[in-house]
Amino acid sequence: MSFELTEDQIAIRDMALSFARDELAPNAVEWDQKKHFPVDTLRAAGELGMGGIYVSEDHGGSALSRFDAVVIFEALSQGCPTIASYISIHNMVAGMVDNFGNDEQKAHWLPKLCTMEWLASYCLTEANAGSDAAALRTRAVRDGDSYILNGAKQFISGAGSSDLYLVMARTGEDGPGGISAFLVPKDTPGLSFGANEHKMGWNAQPTRAVILEDARIPASTLLGQEGMGFKFAMKGLDGGRINIAACSIGGAQAALDKALTYMSERKAFGQTLDRFQALQFRIADMATELEAARTFVHRAASALDAKSKDATRLCAMAKRFATDTGFEVANNALQLFGGYGYLADYGVEKIVRDLRVHQILEGTNEIMRLIVSRSEIGRMA
């Protein structure tokens, strides 16, 4: 792999940075405070090709690589990690429809998902099946030309606002082999939503339970074959993990940049803060750790593009490392502001709150360690 971006990748990054600077950053704090989900801004992102980043051109996608995607998500997160992360989740669903859907499903859903005229949510987690996702209880029962779904999904980003829900439900025996994936439209009778959760961060995107009560959907909404849902979900999460890792890097970079600006202006003991050697050392460590995380995420994205047998392991490693690093860098940036960092005015405390959840979602970092350790133990067996 090359450590330099190509001219095309630089152009893609600069486009995403421009969108982040002009459309996301000026509104990020207000959206957070008002719990406003900026659907019009998302659709503007869709017009730039960000709704189907790695969807094929045949159905309106941008047909970019996973490497291109992490470059985009890092750039978007410098404007607002919350909105960038939702765009990542939307893309995970669109990518799964493109990879695993049939011609009719692709033709129906993808054109409007790619423009973000229709928004999408990923529904795997349940109240009692988070890290142990294979223990999910939502069930789909075949009834003629339909399936009837019953159950509830928890912590679903975009729920209530999204138009399409990719729902993992049990059609067979216990364990991963009995899980299937379904494309559930928002207007499905029997589909409802819980209250918008009160959260530490990510306030600019709604998080609700998705409730299915005798929700009848056509059999044609089954994605792939029965029993393939868990496999699809895990493949989708490989990409989702490096996307969220990139979002952590972008958010942390924004926090570091804010701190550098503040330190060049704030004086103490007769000189600006950036003249103090102890603080210079801290800046050096923060920048170094971010660069290491960025390189790791690029490595994992390249492995995913190459369909390497190590891709899942590397994606888990990169997600763990980059989300831990991103949070620590953002938290250290807040410290460099002193008391001002604790105020909403500078936007740093919002970044810290937003990045904290990245260590939990798309598989907790403890689960990432489990994936990596099992791979290492298996390699020596």
Image (cartoon, helix red, strand yellow):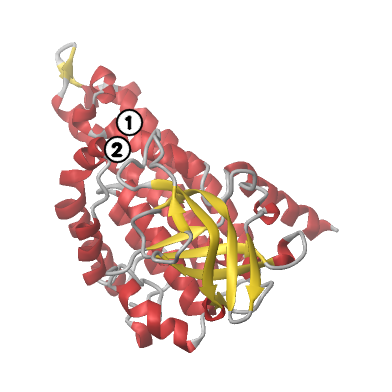
Pointer 1 local density, CA inside 10 Å: few below 14, some 14–19, many at least 20:
many
Location of residue 66 (image quadrant): bottom left
Q: Nearer the viewer, residue 154 or 16?
A: 154
Q: How many marks?
A: 2
Residue 304 appears at what percent x and percent y? 54, 69
In the displayed structure, 59 sits above or below 147; it is below
Residue 351 appears at what percent x and percent y? 32, 37
Quarter containing the C terminus: bottom right
| First of labels 1, 2 by sequence position | 2
- Secondary element at tag 2: helix
Label of residue 255 in the image:
2
Marks 1 and 2 in Cβ contact (< 8 Å): yes
* Residue bearing mark 1: 333
Residue at x-position 37% and y-position 88%: 58
Residue kind at label 2, given as amino acid type: Ala
In the displayed structure, 109 sits above or below 172; it is below
Residue 25 appears at what percent x and percent y? 20, 46
In-image side of 86 versus 364 (left or right): left
Label of residue 122 in the image:
none
- Secondary element at tag 1: helix
Q: Nearer the viewer, residue 14 or 176?
A: 176
Q: Residue furthest top?
A: 269
Residue kind at label 1, given as amino acid type: Ala
In-image side of 172 versus 63 (left or right): right
Residue 341 appears at what percent x and percent y? 27, 25
Residue at x-position 14% and y-position 13%: 270
Pointer 2 local density, CA inside 10 Å: few below 14, some 14–19, many at least 20:
many
In the displayed structure, 183 sits above or below 250; it is below
Residue at x-position 46% and y-position 44%: 358
